[in-house]
């Protein structure tokens, strides 16, 4: 068994697609109409057969409440791995990304947290 798709609730699919593709560099894999919304997935540019990230609309009240509460508590919704967190931090800052935590050493790892502009905090991890 392996993870093939993981979901991330977003408050605006179009805005999320722009942020995740143009700012973070993910590649759009699927964009299929699903009623008023879309089945919209992205993959890492260097692993296009890898795990897909579904940008899922937070239209259900429970999804909206979950997203709002973890954001307000400062809890990241998901984590992305990077090879050089300091370089990634610098590049994203230059693109206007707002970080709530600068790169910080935590045990053997270094983490940073940013706002994805679509209702989530995202953690970067360098192992």
Image: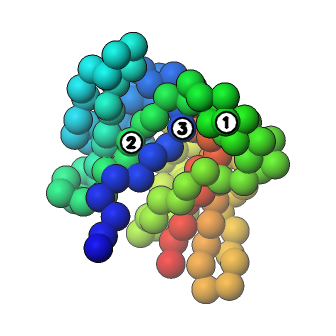
Spatial distance from mark 3 to mark 1, Cα to Cα? 11 Å
**Is the residue 98 above or below the residue 2 in the image?**
above
The residue carrying pointer 2 sits among few (fewer than 14), some (14 to 19) or many (20 or more) residues within 10 Å by Cα, namely: many
Q: Can residue 96 be seen in this view?
A: no
What colouring does the structure picture have?
rainbow
**Is the residue 110 above or below the residue 89 in the image?**
below
Q: State which quadrant residue 50 falls in.
A: bottom left
Residue located at (54% from left, 38% from top)? 9
Q: First in sequence: mark 1 or mark 2?
A: 2
Q: First in sequence: mark 2 or mark 3?
A: 3
The furthest residue to the top: 36
Pointers 3 and 1 in contact (CB under 8 A)?
Answer: no
Query: Where is mark 2, residue-wise?
Result: 54
Q: Is residue 66 left or right of residue 33?
A: right
* Relative depth, front residue between 69 and 25: 69
Q: Is residue 2 left or right of residue 124?
A: left
State the image coordinates of residue 38 (x, y, percent, origin top left): 34, 24
State the image coordinates of residue 4 (x, y, percent, origin top left): 29, 58
Residue 9 is labelled as 3
Q: First in sequence: mark 3 or mark 1?
A: 3
State the image coordinates of residue 71 (x, y, percent, origin top left): 73, 43
Q: In the rendered view of the protein, which quadrant contains the N terminus? A: bottom left
Spatial distance from mark 2 to mark 3, Cα to Cα? 8 Å
Residue 62 is labelled as 1
Q: Is residue 109 visible?
A: yes
* Relative depth, front residue between 97 and 65: 65
Give the secondary structure at mark 1: helix
């Amino acid at each position: 068994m392996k993870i093939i798709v993981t979901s991330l609730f977003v408050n605006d699919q179009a805005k999320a697609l722009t942020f995740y593709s143009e700012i973070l560099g993910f590649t759009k894999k699927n964009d299929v109409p699903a009623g008023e919304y879309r089945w919209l997935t992205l993959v890492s540019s260097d692993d296009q057969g890898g795990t897909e990230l579904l940008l899922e609309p937070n239209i259900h009240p429970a999804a909206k409440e979950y997203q709002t509460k973890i954001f307000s508590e400062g809890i990241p919704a998901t984590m992305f791995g990077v090879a050089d967190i300091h370089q990634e931090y610098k590049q994203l800052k230059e693109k206007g990304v707002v970080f709530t935590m600068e790169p910080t050493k935590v045990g053997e790892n270094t983490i940073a947290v940013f706002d994805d502009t679509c209702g989530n905090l995202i953690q970067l991890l360098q192992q």
